[in-house]
Amino acid sequence: MPKADDIVPPSKNATSASASSGTGQFETGIRYDLFTRLLHLCIVVGVVSQMLVSLVMVYPKPGRPENAWFELHEMVGLSLLGVFTAHWIWSIVKMRVFAEPLLLFPWFSTQARRALQQDLIETLREVRQFRLPYSRTATPLPAAIQGLGLLLGLFLAATGAIIFFGMEADGKMSGLIHGVKEVHGAVSVLMWVYLAVHPTLGILHHFAGHDVLTRVFWFGR
Ligand code: HEM
Ligand code: HEM
């Protein structure tokens, strides 16, 4: 998340792909703090590997042993539970201590929901004109969607942890744990959707001359 000073209404600082492409210059703007960048990197590596490993892993059932990929899925999954929890705690600390708005979770604030609605309308207007909306500051809509990704990750990691602690060594599960496993598998499809959209938008922005990739991945400034 950005520094508090960086947050202004989106309309004041917004620009679009067509406005900035062709200049050959990268737009620069918000700068995520180092810890947020580190957490994001852990999330990228952890979530991408979880999704790929899920394609080759075999989880245990009575009479069918697990394979090594499933053990990796368990270990990375438990680590991700720590990373997602740390991300939310850090976001709340920044809100309480540094007075940064919690743009990742606007749902319980009328003011934040109104800003989100306004940003959605402005985004749709830009998209209808085939422009890629970009802002040098933090804007409500992308942040709210990234927050949903974080909630989704936390949910998968938490249900995974319930499976981990509730399943017997031979893979036997009670009805409840079996239900949690089914929900975990069904909800994980949404993570594929998130992974198809969120990084793609980052790459599109990059080629439009916006600095979104560097501001979240670059550790050198
Ligand atoms: C301790 C942590 C975790 C455990 C023990 C765990 C366990 C499991 C189990 C038993 C399945 C098989 C579900 C089924 O086929 O019905 C599964 C599937 C899956 N898990 Fe996890 N999981 C954990 C964390 C995570 C995390 C953090 C993610 C992603 C961020 C994730 C993504 C997936 C995906 C994509 C599938 C495949 C679903 C399917 O194809 O049906 N898991 N996991
Ligand atoms: C290959 C994978 C990924 C890529 C290339 C990627 C790329 C990016 C980019 C470019 C930004 C900056 C957006 C901006 O400044 O407007 C960003 C921010 C963010 N991304 Fe990702 N991302 C990836 C995976 C994920 C995943 C899996 C999650 C969550 C489940 C996630 C959650 C976030 C969040 C919450 C932010 C805001 C910064 C923060 O608070 O950490 N990203 N990402």
Image: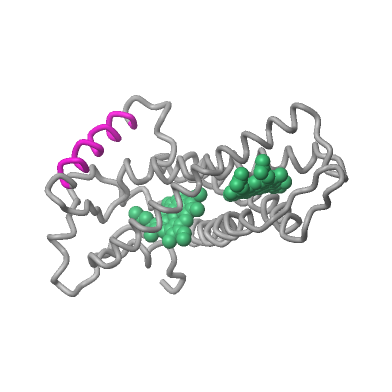
Residue at 77% across, 43% down? 164
- Determine the main secondary structure of the stretch shown in magenta: helix
Bounds of the magenta segment: 112-126
Q: Is residue 85 visible?
A: no
Q: Is residue 121 visible?
A: yes
- Is residue 115 magenta-colored? yes
Q: In the rendered view, does 146 fall on the left or right side of 52?
A: left
* Quarter of the rendering occupied by the C terminus: bottom left
How many numbered marks appear? 0
Residue 127 coordinates in the image, percent (x, y): 18, 47
- Quarter-of-image position of residue 75: bottom right
- Taking the image in four quarters, ligand 2 sits in the one at bottom left
> Does residue 21 lie above or below 2 as drawn?
below
Q: Nearer the viewer, residue 129 or 122?
A: 129
Residue at 75% across, 32% down? 177
Q: In the rendered view, does 95 fall on the left or right side of 136?
A: right
